[in-house]
Amino acid sequence: MAKFKLDEVDHQILEMLIENTRVPFTDIAKKLLISAGTVHVRVKKMEESGIIKGSTLKVNYEKFGYSFIAYVGVFLNKSSQTGFVLERIKEIPYVTVSHITTGKFNIFCKIRAKNTKHAKDVIFMIDEIEGVYRTETMISMEESINDKKRLMQTIFKEMKEEKS
């Protein structure tokens, strides 16, 4: 597949979609002074090229009583157990993100829980997985930055500079 080249209009479309994945294409078109069909075609091309992979919805978990966030570093007996342990971790619905990492931990997870007792129960679920040597937990006091838009703006700026 040929490499897809983004232009300024594509950058602006992406920025608006990052800000709000549910923004109607007609609204994007009006702001950019192009047709909704053009927006649709450009988004479709970005999806086909793999630049856009689905869309997500931001959920306020606090409204559901899940305001406790912790990060759990998982140490394994053997690195070769990573796949097996990850499959078991996938069975724990309170683990919302998981990464295979280098450095101190073999696996690094983000968990959401109702409170400290619930988090302890989730951490014990991870601890009980065969192959887990131990875990180390960090409690999130507050999510201070969660901004994909700034990164995309920096990437677009770097792309422009490379062209110059």
Image: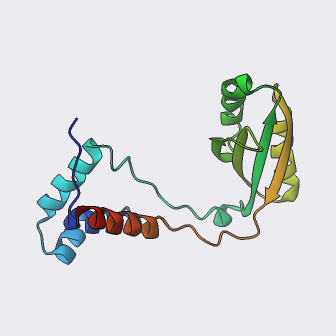
Please tell me in which quadrant of the rendered image residue 125 appears. top right
Which sits in the foreground, 28 or 83?
A: 83
Locate the N terminus by quadrant: top left
Q: Is residue 23 visible?
A: no
**110 to the left or right of 154:** right
Q: Residue at x 67, y 41 (%)?
A: 101
Residue 109 in the image: x percent, y percent? 70, 46
Report whether 36 appears left or right of 96: left
Q: In which quarter of the view is residue 32 placed? A: bottom left
Residue name at image x 13 percent, y 75 percent:
33
Q: Position of residue 108 (x, y in %)?
A: 71, 45
Could one spot residue 153 in this view of the protein?
Answer: yes
Residue drawn 77% across and 46% down? 73
Give the answer, above or below, for where 8 lies relative to 112.
below
| Residue drawn at (45%, 70%) of the image | 150
Q: Position of residue 156 (x, y in %)?
A: 33, 65
Placement of 14 over or under 110, stated as above or below: below
Judged left or right of residue 118, residue 17 is left
- Whole-percent x, y for residue 94 in the image: 70, 46
64, 60: nearer the viewer: 60
